[in-house]
Amino acid sequence: QVQLVESGGGLVQAGGSLRLSCAASGSIRSINAMAWYRQAPGKQRELVARISSGGSTNYADAVKGRFTISRDGAKNTVYLQMNSLKPEDTAVYYCNFRNIFYPSVAEYWGQGTQVTVSS
């Protein structure tokens, strides 16, 4: 099992910045990936950004150039720096952790943190 603790959500004006953090603990394998997803009211949960244990990253087109995902391997913590926030970024943001046992994956979710961007 892996436990995830998120922090950093809140209310910000358009154009502002926020940083989300997610600390993982428990049975963490050396090959893994951490990610942030978000879900706005009435919409499906979508991937925002992912970073592998090797440091490879990928981003949703909607956030490229504005958001940066990073991780501290020693602390098993992933960060999402969100700049130039827009009202359409308003959503509940969920931390996601994948333990990778090729070809299988064990997936875990955080409880979610609300990000609200006012216009």
Image (cartoon, rainbow, N blue to C red):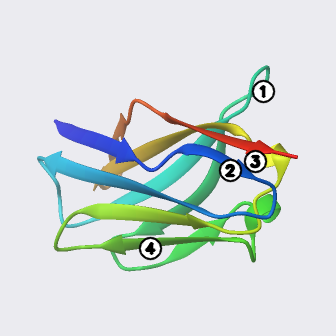
Q: CA distance from mark 1 to mark 4?
A: 26 Å
Question: Disc 2 residue type?
Answer: Val
Judged by depth in the image, the label closer to the viewer, 1 or 3, is 3
SS at mark 2? strand
Query: Reading the chain from its start, which is encountered first: label 3 or label 2?
Result: 2
**Marks 2,4: beta carbons within 8 A:** no
SS at mark 3? helix
Query: Reading the chain from its start, which is encountered first: label 3 or label 4?
Result: 4
Q: Residues within 10 Å of mark 3 (few under 14, many from 20)?
A: many
Q: Name the residue tied to disc 2.
A: 12
Judged by depth in the image, the label closer to the viewer, 2 or 4, is 2
Outermost residue on the left side: it is 26
Q: CA distance from mark 1 to mark 3?
A: 12 Å
Judged by depth in the image, the label closer to the viewer, 3 or 2, is 2
Q: Name the residue tied to disc 4.
A: 70
Q: Name the residue tied to disc 1.
A: 43
Q: In the figure, 114 relative to 102: above or below?
A: above
Query: Reading the chain from its start, which is encountered first: label 1 or label 3?
Result: 1
Q: Name the residue tied to disc 3.
A: 89
Outermost residue on the top side: it is 42
**Marks 1,3: beta carbons within 8 A:** no
Q: In the figure, 59 relative to 36: above or below?
A: below
Residue drawn at point x = 35 percent, y = 79 percent: 54
Residue drawn at point x = 23 percent, y = 63 percent: 76
SS at mark 1? loop
In the picture, which quadrant includes the N terminus? top left
Judged by depth in the image, the label closer to the viewer, 1 or 2, is 2
Q: Residue 63: percent from the left, percent from the top?
A: 75, 63
Q: Quadrant of residue 91?
A: top right
Would residue 86 appear left or right of 45 to someone viewing this image?
A: right
SS at mark 4? strand
Question: Disc 1 residue type?
Answer: Lys
